[in-house]
Structure formats: structure tokens, C-alpha cells
Image: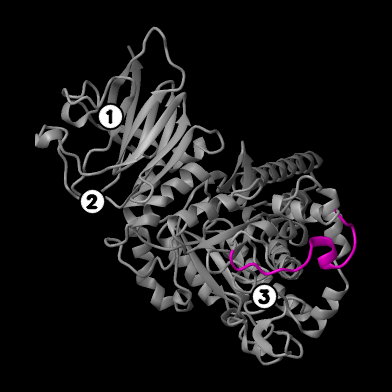
Amino acid sequence: MATGTEAMDNQCEDGRVETNGCKVALDIHYLHNNDAKNKIASMKKLSLIIIFSIAATTLSAQKTAIPHLEKKGSTTQLIVQGKPFLILGGELHNSSTSGAAYMRPIWEQMKKKNLNTVIAAVYWELVEPQEGRFDFALVDSMINGARKHDLHLVILWFGSWKNGYSMYVPGWVKNNTERFPRVKNKKGEPFVVLSALGEASMKADAKAFKAVMQHIRQVDEKYQTVITAQIENEVGLFYEPRDYNEAAIMAYDQGVPADLVNYLVANKGKLQPELDSVWKANGNKTSGSWEEVFGKSVLNKEDATALSYLPEELFTVYHYARYIGQVAAAGKEAYPIPMYVNAWIKQHGFSWPSRYPSGGPVPHTLDVWRQAAPAIDFIAPDIYVSIPEARYTIEQYHRPGNPVFIPEFKPGAASASLAFWAYGQQDAISFSPFGIDESSPEEDPITKSYAALSQVQQLILQHQGKGTMAGIYVDTTDKSQSFELNGYSVKVNLSQPLFAPAGGAVAGLSSSDKRVMSAGGIVFATGADEFIVVGKDFSATFTPIKADTQKTKIDIEYMDEGSFVNGKWITIRRLNGDEGTGGGDYGFGFNKGFSGMFRFQPSATGNYNIVKFKLYKY
């Protein structure tokens, strides 16, 4: 963006001043008029035009601030086109964007799935097939395809590493192992992995990524189709906890670098609890070998929470972070949008470094990433585990200064339900099932989840960081969830086939015998005793935390089903009688009046509903 001074310096040959693309025609022939008064008037006119042009440029710059992160209360939000933005995402298969023609029919399918953002790969090998010669045709096709369908993009830079391996580097990198050294194991055998200590590799990667970001800024800054960038993909080493090539052995033997120690000292007491604990247990040393500072290297395959091979892992993280941090910094010199790294997570069965990629951004290494890669804004998990472990993982990544951003999640009905919990309970910036282009909109359960979430996304953004909403996920394993909200203790239960006791069928109590496997939703507190709930297939009870001695019982004042259209609430119908939950319990004794009850009505289409209701005491 040109500054005012730059705009004045950029004068056109035909006498026009160009101000950031806004061309102001200045007829200056009259400046040569001998009439002094005309000269003075003309100069004043010229000055005013320039001043107004500069002011217009400044206002334009303010209106079109590039995508960035902003702190809001206890959370962090992504800002796009000057407004908070919630990514309803999906990640394409790895090879999808390698062909423009292949992608043409897919963009429309993404829109039909109610996505607002597609996460897609940009490949170093195709961007720079010959060193120093760049081809951005595929980048342009991605941007144009997304923009045409009113979608945003998160680009995945498949540069030096993808899933730990260097499979996407150009041929001129693959074939020059002397210039671009490889990782070696203890036996001295090379891997198909660039060494994170390879300076030439880092500089080549950084140069290519910077060129990509420069091009994106040139063609897209005005539109902000591209809103975030992931640097590399699931980096780290399999089979060995650290690199054993010559440079790596020498670096490890030199001990913990001074810059990392200085960071530990400066942040003592504020470090991640895992790192703080091991550093303290070893005497908070400010120099020494990796084992002297962080403890002896051990392997514990039985305890998934154990910090196995920690000295080797931290050494490896440090060098991956330095490398990737410099790639990200080069990209940000060109276009400083938010940038992150993603992880193959630590999990059951993959619980020690080298079983999961050693050197990747797992939560207990967050401080090393912050120190060695300040250009990286946050670390993010790729999740393909059971729902209980997935929820634990998300909670582990949700740390102060590290917002929840999920670039990959195992697709399916359970994940389509869990998206609500991620946004509502963990203030997630992004949720994104992987392989989003694999299924049709009609058969993908995320389509209906995103249809509902797109209606309440502004509500989610308004309530983030305030403690005024709660995300819900229940399933056949964990059938209930409890939390406190807006002065009430809330208990949510997974809907089950509901029949009147003793076999009696009663209108409003009988329901379909369809078995529900999982349910998701969000509860928003919108005022005193007022709530909006989005979801399906669950019921909830609302019990006052503090009892009213004068009015000991509670019931529904009103309950409306509706939708949000352009952010405005539109009531579709008033729910009462058989479709409401007010009144008594028809003599069956399940409602004594001490809690307000809520349940979603069955939907023939399986769509999510949005309900607004208010409780009252009597």
C-alpha cells in the first residue's frame, strides 16, 4: 500500500498523480500561464487534489486491512475485510489442486456443502520446477475458482516437508543431496527427508514461498480470498528422535543454544507447564547439554502422557522451528497474513517422538516454537482419533495465546456434531474435515452442520471470549454433558426414542424410534433468563444455580423456532402444546417444576433447528 509520500512521488508521464491505483487527472498546462493569479489558484487546486487523494488512500488502506489476528477478551479472532471471521472449512485431498481442470467442478460442490473456506495445497515442485523460474498458473486458478464461488482460501505450502517427508520439493532439490543435505539415522543411512539444519534448503524454500506470497498479494490483496497460510505439513522425523547427519551431531554436542536458554530465563514461571516442570526438575540450568538442561533421555511406551526422548525432541523441534520460522518470515515480508504450522499429533499408539514425527508442533513444545519461530502465529492439530481423544487434543492445543484452529479432522457424522462443540466451547477459529472433495454435498453430514453454523456464525463471534455460550457434544458413549451458563446449571442429554410410560402413547411424548449416535449444538445466553439454542437430537434441563425462596418453580415463558437471515432473527413458528416443553408432565411425574425443560422437535429432513426461548419463575 503506497504511503502519501510515495503517492506524490509516483507521477504519471501525462501529468496525472497515481495514488494506489486511483488516478487523478491533473490538467497542468495552465501552470505555465503568465497570469500570476492563475498560477497561485492552480497551485492551490493542485495541492487540494493531492491532499484529498492522500486522504482517500489512507481511508482505503484502513478499510482493506489485510487478514490478521486480534485479541478479544480471552480469545483470538481472525479478521478478514476488517471484520471477525469464522472459518467453516474443509481440506481438499493432497493432489486436487494440482490440476485446474480437475478442480473446476469441485468449487461448486464446496459451496453446496455450505463451506466458506477451502483449505488447499500449493506445491513447491510445480511453482518452481526450475530454480529461479516461477509458475503461478495453479495458484491463480485456485484463487479465481474460490473467488468465483464466494469462498476463501487457506493455502498449504507443501515445501520442504509433507507428513515428515520431502516429497514435494522440486527435482533440482531432490537430485542435489550435497547442496540440500538429508537426514541420516544412527547408521548413517539417508532418509527421503531434508535436514532441518540445511541452510541452503531453508533459503531455497524461503525464496520460493516469498515469491508465492508476493504474487498472492499482487492479485488478491484487494479481495482477500487467501486469508491464512500453513507452512509445510506435519513436519518431523519418523524412526529416529533426532537427525544424525554430520551437522546435526555437531549441533547436538554443542548443547542448548543461548537464545533458547535466554527465552527460558525471560519467561520463567510463564512457560508451558510440561517444559517448566522438566527445566525446574533439572535445576533451571542456564547452560549445558540437552540432557543436563532437560533431563535424561528415556522411552516410556506404556504411558501416553510421558515425555519420552525429550532432550532429542526439543533439539529437533528447535531446528525445525528455526528453519520454518525463517520460511514464514520471508513470506510475511511479502504479505504478512496469519501463518501457522500443523502437527501429526501425539496419540495412543503414537505416543513417543519418532513414533509420531519428532520435531513437530505438539503442545508441550509450544515455547520452543515461540522462541525459534516468532513469525509463526500458532500451532494446530490434525485429528484422526476417537472423539474422546479428539476433545482432549483440542483442549491441549487451546492454550493462552494459541487459538484453536483445526485444519484437518477425520470426516463423518461424529465430527459434524463435534464442530459445534469446537466453535462454542473452545472458541475455534476453524474446523475442517479432511478430504472434503471426496463425498457429495447430499451424503456429507457436514453440509447440514455448516448450514446451521453459517446462520449463527455472527452470534458465535459476538459471544467468543465472554463466557456467554457453551458448545455441546453428546453421543452413545457420553450421553450427557453439564455446565453452568447465565445463572443456570444446564444438563444436556442425547435424545433417545421416547415413549410414554407403561406403553401409553401420548401426543407430544411419543417420537421416532430412530437411534441417534451423536448430537452437537451451541447454547447462547442472550439476556436474563433468555437463550438461543442451535442443534438437534438432544434435550436440556435448566436449573437455577441460586434458588429463589419466593418463587421456587420455573417454566417456559415462550419458545420460538426461527432462523437468521442476514444476521436478523426471523421467527418461523411459536412452539407450544405438543411441540413445546412448558406446562406439566401429564401426570407421569418427570417434571416437578424445579427445572425448565427444552428439547428439539424431530425433523423429517434431519436438519438442525434454531430455537429462542425464555424461562420464568413462579
Q: Is residue 9 visible?
A: yes
Read off the residue under disc 3: 208
Q: Which of 502/535 is in front?
A: 502
Where is residue 110 shown, x and y percent of the image?
38, 62
When asked about the image quadrant of residue 274, the answer is bottom right
Q: Which corner quadrant holds the C terminus?
A: top left
Mark nearer the viewer, 2 or 1: 2
Spatial CA distance of label 3 from label 2 is 52 Å
Mark nearer the viewer, 1 or 3: 1
Where is residue 24 shown, x and y percent of the image?
64, 51
Classify mark 2: helix, strand or loop.
loop
Q: Which corner quadrant holds the N terminus?
A: bottom right
Under mark 1, the amino acid is Asp
Q: Which residue is drawn at the image coordinates 81% and 41% (left, top)?
A: 36
Read off the residue under disc 1: 560
- Extreme residue in the front direction: 302
Spatial CA distance of label 2 from label 1 is 26 Å
The image shows residue 471, relative to residue 339, as above or below, that is: above
Side (left or right) of 369 relative to 445: right
Classify mark 1: helix, strand or loop.
strand
Under mark 2, the amino acid is Arg
Rendered image: mark on residue 515 = 2
Q: Which of 504/255 is in front?
A: 504
Q: Which residue is drawn at the image coordinates 49% and 32% (left, top)?
A: 468
Q: How many marks?
A: 3
**Where does the magenta region start and end?**
284-302
Tag 2 and tag 1, C-beta contact below 8 Å? no
* Magenta span includes 291: yes
